[in-house]
Image: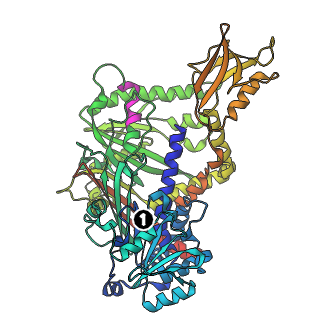
Amino acid sequence: MQNGQSRSISSRRTLAAAFFVAAHFIAGAHNGSGVARAEQSANAPTIDFARIVPGDADFYVEVSNLSELRASFQSLGIWQALRETLEGDVPSTQPWQNRSEQLLGMSSEELIVRVLGKRAALFAKRSDDWQNGVLIAEIESQLSLRVLLQDWRARPLADEGAVRRYLLRGNLLCAVLDRTILLGPPDDPDGLWGRSVLLMTGRGPHLAGQSAFASLRSRLTSEPDAMVFARWPDDYPYAFANCERLMLSMQFDGAKTSCSLYGRRRTPKHDEPRINSDILRRASGSAIALWAGALNEASTSPSDDTLAPTGPGEFLHQIIAKLPAWRSTGPSLLASIDPCVLLQLGSLKTDDFHFPTLTLTMRSEEAASIVRQLDPVLVLFTQMIAIFATSTGGTTDMPDVEHIEAAGADLRRIDLGRVLARRSGLAFLRPMKLAWTADGKDVIIGTSAESVTESIQARHNPGNSTSPIQAALRELHNDNEESMAEFGYIRGESVSEMLNSWITFAEQRHPEVVDNGWWQVWIASKLAEESRLGVGMVDDETAPGRAIVKEISPTSPAALFLRENDVVVGIFGKPLDAKHAARSVADRYERRGDADVLSLDVIRDGNRIQLDIPVPKPPKLTSLNIRPVTALRRLAGLLSGIESASYVRVSNDPSNLDVRVVVRWSARGAEQSTTSR
């Protein structure tokens, strides 16, 4: 499991790094070098860049008007936070595109102002190999192009028809046709640059002519300011949303960014549940984030604990399915719950801490019965914690259920926070109170009585239809023509305030956890604990070089192979040390390298046998870059510039992925940026 997670994280980082390239184009542009949109439309591009990209390129990014976009992001005060967040995923080895000073003799800012500021693109053989990608750029004028070639000390190579070819400083490859230039890495390792040169002369299959690309581009309703295309082979396990290909388009309009995400699924999603818009009326006006979507029952069977949830719906289904009240004999109340649920995040503010609250709303014809079954489960859960939190000889502080009336509903609540705070010693958990109720056909469960009450009131509040959440939903979704499968919303500034309160609280009360090194040690110890052998041995006092098995943990990888009183005499084909034999087994196991099989020579009942035991590969601690506090600071900085972000996924065609996103940037972020400068 550990290796699979590592590959998944690595894959996501690589893809994030590739998407960073598109953002990095915007990063270096100078505020005053923008090209007005009116000028751009008057001097329309003459070449479709996708027609000079080889047809087998699986990754393509195109961005227009970079300077203006960069200036807009800077004026909104969110660019630095965005860049820091994205740069956290960029590999430590710098690709050639980011070494403009060394290779071309110009800063990254100068490169974008003079080369990439009008229109630019990057393409690569694969999304995880963008470091060997090729850049395309449209230069402002022929004069500017001639000056660039002089500055780069361009040495002419043999022309390819009307295309002029050059070797630049740093051995970069350059091709020129009219005002379009093609920059390739030294030696052209994937052959992309050479084939693109041929495409500039009209020879060869190009990306624009590939149905995989053209079918997605045809779905764009307008010319985007930025576009990203990616596709993955069938055996690639970490493709986004399990798509075989994907296209992202972005439109920038002042303080608003609109995105459309279109993909072709590998496997169609037939009969996907649709969100009942009525459940969204439970959205509280004070919620700082929410998600509505389907519980994915198919991939989260309660009996399969090995499956890892891949989204909010699967995660929630696993939790709900494991409740003891719903795993008894007879018809399951879980089956009566509507597949689509609403999950809301709120914030309870104390003097020095913003406590996060979660509220879950589920629809069911058996709402009242579900709540009655929840009563003993949640009470028993809380009381068990209370018992374990009581010191020996002490008096157990046993919380009980309170019933209160909330907007006509019978609201149950129990003081879980008091028990958790005593159990853990973390006082900030005190505000937590489990609360649950049935209101009509809705079951509402939350970690705060206030948040549950607000969800009850929201359903009956006519003014709720004009809330920012409902406005965001109307902007993204056409109720009359489309089926909504998923909806998400976040108030960036509010979430940023909450995250910053956590960091401040940690700095004041638990300064050790603010140190990234503390997390490195902690995660390393946890990984080492998970990968330990879990077998207790003692030296055989009657014979050197022998270790007797005395105890085997039930979770040990050797539990099905070793037996108590087995005598281990060798490991990995070599005898044990004469002295401290048991210790030598542990030491050699820890130093096993990448071995995923532990070979032991064992004497059992007088017979010598060899056991080949499958074991997890040891974690590569050197590759860990666990910096949660740094990540939290960056995320808080980025969210502080976002007034709101929302998305809708519609499901009109089971074979297609269709997501719309709107981000509204905060004027407050611009004010903070101006103040900081």
Residue 617 drawn at (x, y percent): 59, 36
Q: Is residue 562 positioned above or below 27 on the image?
A: above
Question: Which quadrant, please, contains the C terminus?
Answer: bottom right
The outermost residue toward the left is: 480
Q: Nearer the viewer, residue 175 or 122?
A: 175
Q: Which residues are magenta?
A: 317-326
| Residue 615 shown in magenta | no
| Residue 322 shown in magenta | yes
Residue 651 drawn at (x, y percent): 25, 51
Badge 1 amino acid: Glu
Q: Is residue 362 left or right of residue 6?
A: left
User: Is residue 108 visible from the viewing direction of this image?
Assistant: yes
- The colour scheme is rainbow
Question: 10 Å neighbourhood of mark 1: few (<14), some, or many (≥20)?
Answer: many
Q: Main secondary structure of the magenta part?
A: helix
The residue under the point 24% across, 48% down is 654
The outermost residue toward the right is: 579
Q: Nearer the viewer, residue 326 or 544?
A: 544
Q: Is residue 638 positioned above or below 200 on the image?
A: above
Q: Which residue is mark 1?
A: 643
Residue 94 drawn at (x, y percent): 59, 65
The residue under the point 62% across, 75% down is 102
What element does badge 1 sit on? strand
Q: Nearer the viewer, residue 487 or 390?
A: 487
The residue under the point 68% across, 52% down is 515
Instruction: Please state the total of marks drawn on the protein image.
Output: 1
Q: Is residue 187 left or right of residue 537?
A: left
